Image (cartoon, grey):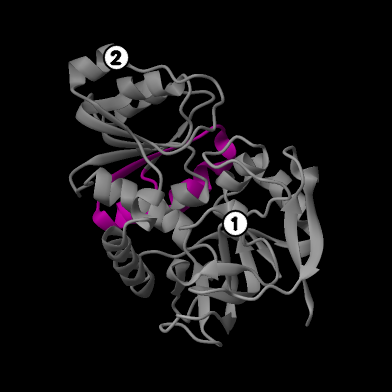
């Protein structure tokens, strides 16, 4: 093959800016590998990147995407621990603009590639690293969650939210999840949440304090931000930790100053890059995740699979926030 197809966008905007371009077949450089893609995992970060509202800004025409699974079909100079034929998926440890993986033959750095258990399908294989590294880093490395604690997980139906529920259950903590309405309550309980709060009709802080008999949540894992942050201060326990890992609410966040002073709260911003750019911490995360996958404590949940040609529809579905788990594009 002399050409391949890659998803790019030539300007920021809604899902309609995504287009499938036919390009020359790329060759891996030093320290890189090429993957014959089988499945692509979608993430909210890619929607933000496409809109020009992410921590990284696109340079046009821009590639996009963090997660792909498939088979290595070319290896660059200096790569010794991977070979053609290896079944792998990618760890978000690179810039999307340079290495975006939405395509049939993406090039990625070898250090951002990992094999995955053979009992997983390609769709499940592409749903591992973003969600589990993000959740592991927050719950285990930053939050130090223990079995006698309570964790509040907001926007819990996302792939990261489901991963956090699974990890918290493995640890043995009490899990409180939030979702806007009643549609996802049963699914979140089936995923392992002990309690589910419908945030459109219930006060999160009042419900958490009722559930915990006034103690509050020891750890809060939140991708929303905005004015909700102030209410999360009311829901937090004494010396609680609030981890902000996203900004789904575009409105300014309201810092809960008096609650932070009263309760000695820790409020911290966090991304998985704290782990993926630190080899020692990343190795700890990988071993934790491998163990969980092998013991079936962790099991990627795929919500819906789209065809490659329907990449725009897949992004629109993600923006509608209807999923419970991972949205996947099959090649």
Give the image quarter of residue 307: bottom right
Q: Is residue 107 above or below residue 234?
A: below
Image side of residue 293 versus residue 38, left or right: left
Residue 165 in view (yes/no)? no
Instruction: Give the x, y percent position of residue 4.
Output: 76, 72
Give the image quarter of residue 256: top left
Q: Split into 4 quadrants, where in the image is the N terminus?
A: bottom right
Instruction: Give the x, y percent position of residue 178.
Output: 45, 36
Give neighbour class at mark 1: few <14, some 14-19, many 20+ (Cα, 10 Å). Answer: some
| Residue receiving disc 2 | 257
Q: Residue at the spot x=42%, y=84% of the render?
A: 80
Which one is in front, 51 or 312?
A: 51
Q: Residue at the spot x=26%, y=44% of the render?
A: 142
How far apart marks 1 and 2 lie (CA) works out to 40 Å
Image side of residue 90 versus residue 23, left or right: left
Q: Residue at the spot x=48%, y=73% of the render?
A: 31
Residue that sits furthest to the top in the current view? 258
Please tell me the numbered disc located at residue 98.
Answer: 1
The magenta stretch spans residue 15: no
């Amino acid at each position: 093959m002399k050409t391949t197809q890659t998803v790019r966008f030539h300007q920021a905007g809604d899902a309609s800016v995504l287009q499938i371009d036919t390009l020359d077949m790329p060759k891996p450089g030093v320290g890189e590998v090429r993957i014959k893609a089988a499945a692509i995992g979608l993430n909210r970060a890619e929607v933000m990147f496409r809109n020009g509202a992410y921590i990284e800004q696109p340079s046009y025409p821009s590639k996009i995407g963090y997660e792909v699974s498939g088979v290595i079909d070319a290896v660059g100079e200096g790569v010794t621990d991977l070979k053609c034929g290896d079944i792998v998926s990618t760890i978000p440890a690179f810039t999307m603009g340079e290495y975006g993986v939405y395509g049939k033959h993406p090039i990625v750095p070898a250090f951002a590639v990992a094999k995955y258990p053979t009992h997983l399908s390609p769709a499940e294989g592409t749903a591992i690293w973003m969600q589990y590294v993000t959740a592991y880093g927050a719950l285990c490395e930053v939050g130090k969650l223990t079995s006698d604690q309570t964790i509040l997980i907001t926007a819990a139906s996302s792939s990261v939210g489901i991963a956090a529920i699974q990890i918290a259950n493995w640890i043995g903590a009490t899990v409180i999840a939030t979702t806007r309405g009643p549609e996802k309550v049963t699914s979140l309980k089936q995923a392992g949440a002990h309690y589910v709060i419908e945030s459109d009709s219930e006060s999160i802080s009042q419900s958490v304090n009722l559930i915990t008999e006034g103690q509050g949540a020891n750890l809060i894992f939140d991708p929303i931000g905005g004015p909700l942050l102030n209410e999360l201060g009311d829901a937090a326990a004494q010396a609680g930790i609030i981890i902000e890992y996203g900004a789904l609410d575009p409105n300014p966040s309201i810092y809960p100053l008096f609650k932070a002073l009263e309760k000695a709260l820790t409020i911290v911003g966090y991304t998985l890059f704290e782990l993926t750019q630190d080899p020692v911490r990343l190795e700890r995360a990988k071993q934790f995740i491998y163990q969980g996958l092998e013991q079936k404590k962790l099991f990627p949940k795929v919500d819906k699979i789209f065809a490659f040609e329907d990449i725009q529809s897949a992004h629109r579905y993600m923006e509608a926030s209807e999923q419970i788990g991972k949205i996947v594009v099959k090649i």
